[in-house]
Image (cartoon, helix red, strand yellow):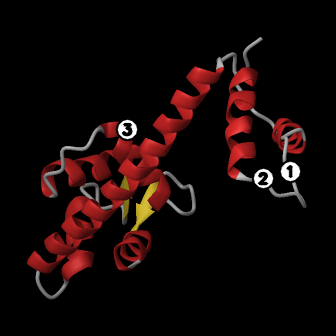
């Protein structure tokens, strides 16, 4: 039977049933054994589970590249804005002048001001990563912390 969720109990069970577990540590072989076990919980065979894992790792790499590009483009846009830099750029992107950038304003900034061609799903993941307080909006402080990190 396939599931939609994966619980901490499931993770605990798989972890402690993994062959080669030493001092509550899993080696690479054990990790590779655990991937299909997780897949089985979701109704996937070993091949499908491995493909899903590889895809997730690929997205992580893509996300890191997207993060790097966004930082560089925002820094460049802020430098072009002059002495008021980041704050001015942020306020230009905050089209409703709420003091926060929502997801639509973020997409607009990325696509129209930074001329990025990333997929919406990549940009949404990035937005969620930047939204440290999970408010659904980015404050200027969250943006500046991201750019300066």
The residue at 14%/57% (across/down) is 113
In the rendered structure, the answer to whether residue 57 lies left or right of residue 42 reads left
Q: Foreground: 76 or 58?
A: 58
The image shows residue 111, relative to residue 65, as above or below, that is: above
Residues at circles 3 and 2 in contact by the CB criterion of under 8 Å = no
Q: Nearest the camera: 120 or 104? A: 120
Where is residue 149? Give x, y as percent: 41, 77
Q: What whole-number distance in Å separates the C-alpha atoms at marks 3 and 2?
A: 32 Å
Going by the picture, which residue comes out furthest to the bottom? 83
**Which quarter of the figure is the N terminus placed in?**
top right
User: Which x, y percent locates residue 56?
Assistant: 50, 39
Percent of width and height locating residue 9: 88, 39
Does 80 sit left or right of 117 as displayed? left
* Mark 1 or 3, closer to the camera: 1
The residue that mark 1 highlights is 21
Which element type, helix, strand or loop, lies under badge 1? Answer: loop
Few, some or many residues within 10 Å of mark 3 (<14, 14–19, 20+): few
Query: How many numbered marks appear?
Result: 3
Q: Which residue is mark 3?
A: 121
User: Dots 1 and 2: beta carbons under 8 Å?
Assistant: yes
The CA distance from mark 1 to mark 2 is 5 Å
In the picture of the structure, the residue carrying the numbered disc 2 is 26
Real-space CA distance between mark 1 and mark 3, rounded to the nearest whole angstrom: 37 Å
Q: Residue at x 42, y 61 (%)?
A: 138
Q: Of the residues under marks 1 and 2, which one precedes in the sequence?
A: 1
**Mark 2 secondary-structure assignment:** loop
Q: Nearer the viewer, mark 3 or mark 2?
A: 2
Q: Residues within 10 Å of mark 1 (few under 14, many from 20)?
A: some
**Residue 64 image point, x, y percent:** 39, 57
Residue pictured at 54% horizontal, 30% vertical: 52
Left or right: residue 43 compared with residue 70? right
């Amino acid at each position: 039977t396939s599931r939609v969720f994966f619980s901490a109990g499931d993770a605990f069970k798989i972890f402690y049933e993994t062959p080669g577990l030493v001092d509550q540590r899993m080696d690479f072989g054990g990790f590779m054994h655990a991937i299909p076990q997780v897949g089985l919980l979701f109704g996937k065979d070993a091949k499908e589970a491995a493909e899903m894992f590889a895809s997730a790792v690929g997205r992580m790499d893509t996300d890191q590249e997207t993060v790097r590009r966004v930082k560089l483009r925002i820094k460049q846009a802020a430098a072009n804005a002059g002495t008021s830099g980041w704050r001015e750029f942020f306020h230009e992107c905050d089209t409703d002048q709420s003091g926060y950038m929502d997801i639509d304003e973020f997409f607009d900034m990325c696509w129209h001001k930074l001329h990025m061609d990333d997929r919406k799903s990549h940009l949404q993941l990035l937005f969620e990563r930047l939204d440290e307080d999970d408010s659904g909006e980015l404050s200027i402080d969250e943006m500046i912390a991201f750019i300066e990190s």
